[in-house]
Image: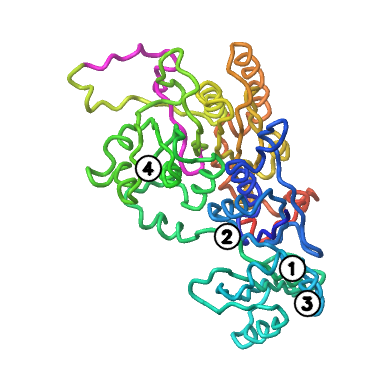
Amino acid sequence: MWYLCVFYHRLLDYRKPEVESLAQLFGAFRDNQNDDVYSQLQWKVPLHHHPDSPFHLVNLPSEHIARSIANRSILVKGMYELWGEGGSYEELKVSLLSYPDEGKLPYLESNSTFRITVDTFGRVISLQEQKELIQGLSYIPFKGRVNLRNPDHNFWLIEVDNCETSNGLPPVAQKRIFFAREIGGADRKLLPTYQLKSRNYLGPTAMDAEIAFLMANQALATPGKLVYDPFVGTGSILVAAAHFGAMTMGADIDIRVVRDGRGPDCNVWSNFKQYGLQMPVGLLRADNNLPPWRPGLKEVFDAIICDPPYGVRAGGRKSGGRKLLKGAVEPYIVPDDKRTDHIPSTAPYSLVECVHDLLDLAAKMLVMGGRLVFFYPILREEESAHNHFPEHPCFKLISSSEQILSSRYCRVLLTMVKTGPYTEEINEAARLKHAEFRENHVKWLEEGNLHSAVFSPIDHAQLMEDGDYKSKDPKPKYRGKYV
């Protein structure tokens, strides 16, 4: 059945991937004969609407699945059973009256309560105008009582204006009006509860709460699943996964973060205690370049979610130290009396090496069908980078959601599903893919030029002289893309 899905007008590229991941989680594709984990939902844009519009029509197998998706989602404002639509209120009336009675009458009975909410996109209307619009729906045979606080059924009258200031979108060719019954909607109260400014223990690279919840949804975090973050930092991503009931585990190369924090009551553990969440299974001091797992251990984690260090706010580090890695000094054995407080030497860890190690770890440690969700940076001038994300033979890329952070730099949330077992042949194929990836991206990945490229000023005069200033960003970006 087709449902009207209304999104919050923000993070536009993240909206459909989140809904499709939750559809997978709640069994929307279980009836597929091939049990295809890459199945995608059917989407339609309402008449006269732009693809970046908050209004979409999505085909879902049942109302229960639609409600489950809407209630769990972060970006779905509401999921609705559409009773009627039109370019004017006369057309809306015709559409509403033609909707089958068997779909309407169960929600209009005298022993039920209801509420009608008027919502607009593109303009603001007064309370008096809202009242008049509701009174204009008198032809709908409501028999129940009005209850504004806790009704049995919520109905929405949604008007999309065709003005030129529709939140940065091109104007709608014609006004569109929807009348629908609410199925469910996102609980945005989560975001003020988990906002970073009230977090007990916070670091400079802590993940924003909204993005962390989106990543947890992409990874299908649920009770009984084990979620791992190899760059845990202050634990923001694992906090979101734990909120959805998943067991969590993290690692970081900085022992001071995972062990000490800022004291016994201000550390990663206290962040979980602050929200009453299940404590992590464990927090390790571990190097992603030299993983600590015993030989033969594999397929332990249901999901790996992380934000690898790519050198914009913080650079990556690996064990060894510059002199040790160059062979200038011999390996150092820490005396027993200094092991407790010893902090190992580290050296720079380039993103190309970090991503390769991450994919190798995920190929070994994820269960079949497990998900790898991580951010990958892109310089917007590098057109080849837009079409060349990290690859691995064990994985299938199912979504890439772009978030523009500046005029020159954006990051992409990649969601991959493990589709094949890890073998030595796969390992060799992955090494060859990594060599190709490194060759294509060596300019700013291997040489560490990302930070300088992001923050260096753009020479507008030179771009205009070269004649390709406009070609740097041929795709129009709307205000919602930048959020």
Going 63% across and 59% down the picture, which residue do you hit?
Answer: 79
User: What residue occupies the far left of the structure in this picture?
Assistant: 337
Instruction: Give the residue number, with chain letter if any, for mark 1.
Output: 101
Q: Of 248 and 110, which appears nearest the observer?
A: 110
Q: Earlier in the sequence, mark 2 or mark 1?
A: 1
Q: Quadrant of the C terminus?
A: bottom right
Q: Please state the horizontal and vertical placement of residue 393, each as a whole percent of the image.
A: 65, 22
Please determine whether, in this image, residue 45 is positioned above or below residue 445.
below
Q: Of 306 and 64, which appears nearest the observer?
A: 64
Which-is-in-front pick, marks 3 and 4?
3
Q: Earlier in the sequence, mark 4 or mark 2?
A: 2
Label 2, label 1: how far apart the Cα atoms are: 22 Å
Relative placement, left or right, of 297 versus 402 is: left
Please determine whether, in this image, residue 331 is positioned above or below residue 404.
above
Amino acid identity at mark 1: Asp
Q: Is residue 330 magenta?
A: yes
Tag 1's secondary structure?
Answer: helix
Q: Please state the horizontal and vertical placement of residue 63, each as a whole percent of the image.
A: 63, 54
Label 3, label 4: how far apart the Cα atoms are: 54 Å
Q: Quadrant of residue 360?
A: top right
Q: Please state the horizontal and vertical placement of residue 219, each as a whole percent of the image.
A: 54, 39
| Mark 1 Cα shell of 10 Å, populated few (<14), some (14-19), many (≥20) | few
Tag 3's secondary structure?
Answer: helix
- Which contiguous range is marked in magenta? 311-335
Instruction: Give the residue number, with chain letter if any, for mark 3.
Output: 93
Dominant secondary structure, magenta: loop
| Mark 3 Cα shell of 10 Å, populated few (<14), some (14-19), many (≥20) | some
